[in-house]
């Protein structure tokens, strides 16, 4: 074959296959870039939350207010540790004072307490004691002093409730009751004891 014709034939073939070759080169280049690009963590990947406390306090006081600025509760403790994994605050030697809508206080103490993030629930452990002094509400009979004692009490601050799945002693004025399971709603004034319930009622004067 004539060299000139051979040259033209080769150029024609190259022109025909050039687009395919360029596409192949681009594809290989893209694959190489993707394979060797640094891998970043997904933006929405869950972060590992430490089970260790992220901060602690000593001889502290934490107050909670409602939207109108009224003081709802105050937590005082000798030492506190916050755990981010559960968003709870563990307090040693706690003293908690909460207030109902009329401003009547209820005081809770224990050896140890665990509060949730917004302070609406507090669990009391070891010599737990909740006391609400006698109150006289408009249009209602005076409510005598109430006291709850046990090794475990669960206080719901916003709902003004106290409960326990362990034995509790309830003192209402001079009367004393005990039971295995306990719940009390301060808004309704109803206390419920179940299990082995015993009571001592003092005669009314």
Image: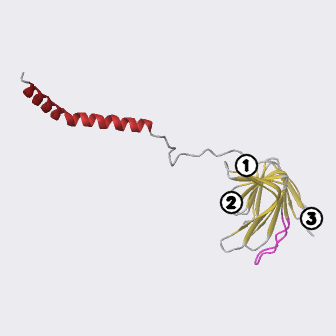
Q: Position of residue 132 (x, y in %)?
A: 83, 65
Which residue is label 3 attached to? 203
Q: In the image, 11: left or right of 85?
A: left
- Can you say whether 136 is above or below 109 in the image? below
Q: CA distance from mark 3 to mark 1?
A: 52 Å
Quadrant assignment for the N terminus? top left
> Which quadrant of the view contains residue 148?
bottom right
Q: Nearer the viewer, residue 117 or 135?
A: 117
Q: CA distance from mark 2 to mark 3?
A: 43 Å
How crowded is the residue under tag 3: few (<14 C-alpha within 10 Å), some, or many (20+)?
few
Residue beneath the point at 50% across and 43% down? 40
Which residue is label 1 attached to? 53
- Can you say whether 138 is above or below 127 in the image? below
| Labelled pair 3, 1 in contact (Cβ < 8 Å) | no
Residues in magenta?
Answer: 131-145
How crowded is the residue under tag 2: few (<14 C-alpha within 10 Å), some, or many (20+)?
few
Mark closer to the chain start, 2 or 3: 2
């Amino acid at each position: 074959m004539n060299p000139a014709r051979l040259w033209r034939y080769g150029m024609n073939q190259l022109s025909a296959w050039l687009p395919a070759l360029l596409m192949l080169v681009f594809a290989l280049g893209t694959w190489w870039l993707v394979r060797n690009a640094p891998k970043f963590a997904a933006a929405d990947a869950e972060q590992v939350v430490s089970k260790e406390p992220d901060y602690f306090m000593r001889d502290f006081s934490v107050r909670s207010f409602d939207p109108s600025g009224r003081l709802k509760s105050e937590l005082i403790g000798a030492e506190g540790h916050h755990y981010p994994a559960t968003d709870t605050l563990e307090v040693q030697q706690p003293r908690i004072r909460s207030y109902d809508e009329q401003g009547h206080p209820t005081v809770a103490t224990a050896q140890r307490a665990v509060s949730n993030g917004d302070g609406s629930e507090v669990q009391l452990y070891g010599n737990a004691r909740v006391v609400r002094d006698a109150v006289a509400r408009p249009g209602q009979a005076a409510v005598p002093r109430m006291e709850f004692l046990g090794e475990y009490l669960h206080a719901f601050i916003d709902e003004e409730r106290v409960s326990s799945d362990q034995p509790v002693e309830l003192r209402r004025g001079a009367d004393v009751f005990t039971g295995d399971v306990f719940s009390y709603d301060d808004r309704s004034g109803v206390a419920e004891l179940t299990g082995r319930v015993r009571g001592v009622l003092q005669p009314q004067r």
